[in-house]
Amino acid sequence: MKNTSKVLGIAVIIAAIALNALSMTGCAPAEADPVIESISVTTQPTKTTYNYGDTFDPTGMVVTATYDNGSTSVVTDYTTDYDTTPFTTVGTAITVTVTYGAFTDTLTVTVIDPYIITPQAALYFKATKTGNIITTGTNTIQNVIDAIKANANGAACIIQFGDGTDTLDLGTDYVTFTNTSAGSNWGAITLIGKITTDLSSSGYGTIYISSGPISVTSNADIANTNTSSFGGKAIYNYGTLNIIGGTITNPNAWTVYNYAMYSTGGVVNISGGTIQSTGGWAVSHYSANGSVNITGGTISSTTSRAVYNQSTGTINISGGAISTTSGSAVYNASTGAINITGGTITGGTGYALYNYSTGTITYTGATITGSKYPSTL
């Protein structure tokens, strides 16, 4: 009968010698590979707003896997449910599901359904919306705008110039939005994309918001490129203009011009975006009625007035950054009122605040850098 305890003892010794040998040669028993427990979208994609019919663009998005040992790593060979399937639901919180193996995470995007105005040939335009094509027999963008108005039939709508990245160049043409009575034509209008014109002083503006109660919200890049000594306007507003983004530029005269012809019109609300003039006035208000209300955004002029109250109206500034290089950042020309309760105003080599006549400029809580006129301000 074998001595089993002796045999077991020898086996233990042999196993210990083997393990010691492995340790001395730098080897160790293999560890099990970490196992994924979850994935998450740790960086949102660059593009978060899509048109109806677009597919998902993952550029800029980072997807991270977390393992059972606490480690993490970035994964790239994931899929989404809109890689090849287009968005066909409109909304501000459309769910996109990201899948990697058996694991998923989600993010939300905005999907809009705009009228997209594109040139088909020299100055022949069409507007497309969810497959509908609106065309006219004449070669002006205004005919297309009027056709969109008829199709919208008083409902709110989004108008996109070009594909949203390329600039739609109108030459010396311009776009007019007009109503004859409340609710009979346009609803609220939202502008996106890029549009440019070359208008002299006789032009109304790249965007002309004309008669009747009408509201336009802009997140577009809008430019008038005319370089004459007294060039036209980038936006001429008689209605209600809400600037929430985009870049609006003009080399001379008025970039955004506000005139209150109607009791319910002539209001500009600026909460974001960039408004620039390199040879004139960036934001100008000329009326006893209406107002300009600045709560955000960047407004600048290089050689003249960044914010200009030309008449007896009111300009309210509670935020944003307003600056000039050599003119006046905020200028009150007549008997109107400029009320400043916040924001940053920088005069450069010119004036930060300039009160020319018997009007009033009051300020509390703002950061003001530069000289004032009169010095008693």
Image: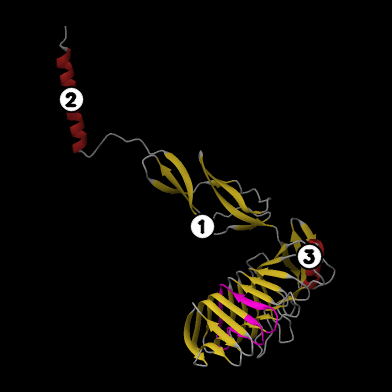
Query: 176 or 322, which is in the foreground?
Result: 322
- Residue drawn at (18%, 18%) of the image: 8
Q: Amino acid at mark 1?
A: Gly
Of the two numbered discs 1 and 2 in the rendering, the one whose residue sits closer to the viewer: 1
Q: Is residue 62 left or right of residue 132?
A: left
Query: 38 or 310, which is in the foreground?
Result: 310
Q: Amino acid at mark 3?
A: Ile
- SS at badge 1: loop
Residue 323, can we see it?
Answer: yes
- Earlier-in-chain disc, 2 versus 3: 2
Q: Which residues are magenta?
A: 286-314
- The outermost residue toward the top is 1
- The outermost residue toward the right is 137
Q: Amino acid at mark 2?
A: Ile
Give the CA distance from mark 2 to mark 3: 89 Å
Residue 148 — which label? 3
Quickly name the residue at label 1.
Answer: 60
Residue 168, can we see it?
Answer: no
- Earlier-in-chain disc, 1 versus 3: 1
Q: Is residue 125 left or right of residue 104?
A: right
Residue 14 — which label? 2
